[in-house]
Amino acid sequence: MTYARLLGTGSYLPERVLSNEALSLTVETNDAWIRSRTGIAQRHLHGAGQTTSDLAYEAALRALQDARLEPDDIDLIVVATTSPDMVFPSTACLLQAKLGVKSGVPAFDIQAVCTGFLYALSVVDQFIRAGSARRALVVGAETFSDLVDWTDRNTCVLFGDGAGAVILGAAEEPGILASRLHADGRYAHLLSAPGKFVQGRFEGTPVVQMDGGAVFKFAVKVLDQVCREVLEACHMTAADVDCFVPHQANIRIIEATADKLGVPHDKVVRTVSQQGNTSAASVPLALDHARRQGLAHAGQNALLAAVGGGFTWGAALLRL
Ligand code: UT7
């Protein structure tokens, strides 16, 4: 049997930092409200001209270095993003060219908003187990700040930019122990950026529209459910989780999910205070943070989970 194993991780946050204090000078909000309702203290924003594939490139270089591999070793590239550089080609193709990954290697994007990285991980796991790839680059990257109305205090305080990358390799020992993906398009209206180009003119709105309370309730319900699904698939319980790496949208969602599952808070990776919600980038950013800070070690079980627009949601259990 062939399985997918984690060979390396990397991440990148753009230099520019926007604190709650700075944000409260331009929109009717304040640090106390943002911290108490979301846990966010600051977020990173991309520089002028810096695109999603630029952030993905920096994260990918670090993941390659961590895995001690060269771009030439990669035989599949998948990028999860909702803020691609352009309508087409895909951000994955642009990243392939920037990295100098050899011609012919397949590259494509996956769009499942904040669950995008879990979708990408699960798809690549299946490529590797089927023998269709041996060394895959999987990236979650976003310039999500471009999808936000910076005059809408209900949404603009929540999001940030960044990228996280992992290298998955074919191995004889299982690394991705189980993964589960779900979607329910009946909830599309609760979290969306409902616009598109029609004959060269933009119709609708290109920025995030959200019923925050409804998203919050749904998130806490399905994150717990999908985490239990992957644990059951592995005949494990929350007690077997060494490191919980949830999507970083809101500290209250993260801690409520950990409490429902029964994972102690010292095993929960929390980066939301420094990064905000970076959508598809948040889980790989948090995983890289956990490995580099010594919160997650080789041989441990890491539980990854996310929920986002669609609605989409998913989880994966990794043996590091
Ligand atoms: O990745 C998945 C995507 N999204 C999420 O996961 C977000 C899920 N939802 C949430 O995180 C929370 O629902 C929010 C952080 C968005 C909002 O928190 P909440 O506790 O649900 O607050 P609320 O919507 O009930 O708003 C309470 C009050 C309102 O004022 P009134 O109507 O009670 O007078 C808002 O107008 O807070 C007001 N408010 C703000 N005040 C200061 C909303 N945004 C702000 C703000 N600063 N930025």
Image (tube, helix red, strand yellow):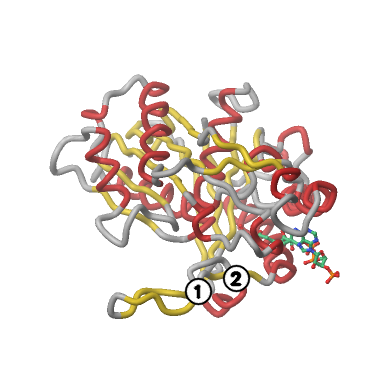
Residue 245 image point, x, y percent = 62, 41
Q: Nearer the viewer, mark 1 or mark 2?
A: 1
Q: Secondary structure at mark 1?
A: loop
Instruction: Name which residue lies at 75% across and 51% down.
Output: 38
Taking depth in this image into account, of 179 and 32 the one nearest to the observer is 32
Q: In the rendered view, would you say 88 is above or below 190? A: above
Is the shortest distance between ligand 1 and the CB of mark 1 under 8 Å?
no
Side of 317 relative to 20 (left or right): left
Q: In the rendered view, would you say 219 is above or below 265? A: below
Task: Find residue 209 and name its label.
Answer: 2
Q: Amino acid at mark 1?
A: Thr
Residue 45 image point, x, y percent = 54, 43
Q: Amino acid at mark 2?
A: Gln
Image region (quadrant) for ligand 1: bottom right
Instruction: Name which residue lies at 53% across and 33% down.
Output: 15
Do the CB atoms of the residues marked 1 and 2 lie less than 8 Å apart?
yes
Q: Quadrant of the N terminus?
A: top left
Taking depth in this image into account, of 233 and 169 the one nearest to the observer is 169
Q: CA distance from mark 1 to mark 2?
A: 9 Å
Most extreme residue toward the front, as rendered?
25
Q: Secondary structure at mark 2?
A: strand
Residue 86 image point, x, y percent = 32, 57
Instruction: Name which residue lies at 80% across and 54% down.
Output: 37
Residue 195 image point, x, y percent = 45, 74
Residue carrying label 1: 205
Side of 302 relative to 267 (left or right): left
